[in-house]
Amino acid sequence: MGDLGVGPEVLKKGASDILECLTPVEKVELKDAAGQAGALGDQSAADALTAFCSTWELGAGFLADCAATLAEGLNSANNDFTATDQAIRDAANSVKTDLS
């Protein structure tokens, strides 16, 4: 468990779950809705819808980037954990062989 407090399988699952959640976010496109804002008949409502759509797209993109970075970090931690565990096993096996 070490400093992370979880095993590698939890890290890998967490990264996988995050990436799965990102799939619908990749499709956030509100340009069409913003383009139809003028049909509201009220300029202030149209401006508010356009601003909302723009902000929402930027926010969704930012959160997706953050989540992807987190998933990458979890995968990296999993790989480091696995590599370190294997190195320790190899070292322990070599000591056992030397002592035999």
Image (cartoon, helix red, strand yellow):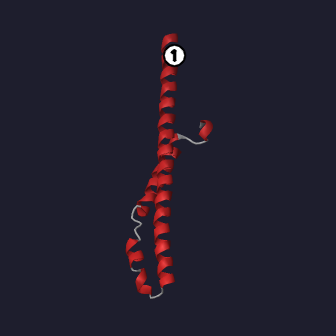
In the rendered image, the residue lying farthest to the bottom is 41
Q: Quadrant of the N terminus?
A: top right
Q: Is residue 8 above or below residue 95?
A: below
Q: Nearer the viewer, residue 45 or 12?
A: 45
Q: Is residue 11 above or below residue 61?
A: above
The kind of residue tagged 1 is: Lys
Q: Is residue 54 visible?
A: yes
The image quarter containing residue 57 is bottom left
Q: Is residue 41 above or below residue 17?
A: below
Residue 87 pos. (x, y %): 49, 26
Q: Residues within 10 Å of mark 1 (few under 14, many from 20)?
A: few
Label 1 belongs to which residue?
96
Left or right relative to 47: residue 31: left
Q: Residue at x 51, y 16 (%)?
A: 96
Q: Is residue 100 visible?
A: no
Q: Residue at x 58, y 42 (%)?
A: 6
Residue 18 pos. (x, y %): 48, 54
The image quarter containing residue 23 is bottom left
Disc 1 on helix, strand or loop? helix
Q: Residue at x 44, y 54 (%)?
A: 19
Q: Is residue 71 above or below residue 77?
A: below
Q: Nearer the viewer, residue 24 or 63?
A: 63
Residue 95 pos. (x, y %): 52, 15
Q: Residue at x 47, y 45 (%)?
A: 72
Q: Nearer the viewer, residue 34 or 93?
A: 34
Left or right relative to 39: residue 91: right
Residue 82 pos. (x, y %): 48, 34
In the rendered image, the residue lying farthest to the front is 43
